[in-house]
């Protein structure tokens, strides 16, 4: 009769198991099958172009906000101009978040983690990456996370 150890049950490995810990300590994976020759280089170029475009938007919004906020000191607190300054600030924050998402995608490319879902570890569909190259999650995990994200907005 086989003996069983009471010390520790065998560890169960889930697909996401290898994703715990900081990204720089995670092992690099082979590129997903939907990246053909030069596909990853095209994604990097696409992300870099998006990054430059977002950076220009953030800069323009920051300048517009400071112009509006500087002239707002002479007006009443509840004026239309103060509402415009708040709107510009919200837009700048959203653009900065998008910029951070793009930078994270570029970091994932450098680390060899691009194209893999951060939640389940499966490859992200090429069609989804073509539309949203900065996406972190596969479609299934993104749908599960969407209600949580909207609860905090």
Image (cartoon, rainbow, N blue to C red):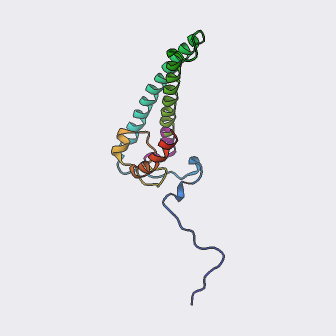
**Residue 1, image x and y in percent?**
57, 90
Rendered view: 11 above or below 65: below
**Residue 105, image x and y in percent?**
48, 40
| Number of numbered discs | 0
State left or right for residue 70 relative to residue 151: right
Rendered residue at 50%/35% (across/down): 103
The magenta span reads 105-115
Of residue 129 and residue 88, the one placed in the foreground of this image is: 88
**Residue 32, image x and y in percent?**
39, 50
State left or right for residue 125 relative to residue 72: left
Residue 36 visible in rendering: no
Q: Is residue 16 magenta?
A: no
Instruction: Determine the residue located farthest toward the right in the rendered image.
Output: 7
Residue 29 visible in rendering: yes
Rendered view: 21 above or below 5: above
**Residue 40, image x and y in percent?**
40, 41
Q: Is the magenta stretch mostly helix, strand or loop?
A: helix
Rendered view: 45 above or below 76: below
Of residue 124 and residue 31, the one placed in the foreground of this image is: 124
Rendered residue at 43%/54% (across/down): 122
Rendered residue at 46%/30% (across/down): 51
State left or right for residue 69 relative to residue 105: right
């Amino acid at each position: 009769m086989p003996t069983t150890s009471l010390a520790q049950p065998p560890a169960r490995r889930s697909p996401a198991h290898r994703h715990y810990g900081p990204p720089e300590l995670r092992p690099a994976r082979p590129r997903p099958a939907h990246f053909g020759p030069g596909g990853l280089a095209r994604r990097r170029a696409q992300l870099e172009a998006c990054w430059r475009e977002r950076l220009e938007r953030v800069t323009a919004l920051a300048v517009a906000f400071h112009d509006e906020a500087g002239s707002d000191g002479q007006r009443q607190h509840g004026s239309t101009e103060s509402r415009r300054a708040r709107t510009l600030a919200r837009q700048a924050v959203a653009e900065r978040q998008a910029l951070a998402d793009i930078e994270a995608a570029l970091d994932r490319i450098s680390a060899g983690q691009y194209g893999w879902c951060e939640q389940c570890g499966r490859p992200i569909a090429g069609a989804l990456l073509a539309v949203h190259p900065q996406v972190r999650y596969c479609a299934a995990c993104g749908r599960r996370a969407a209600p949580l994200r909207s609860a905090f907005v």
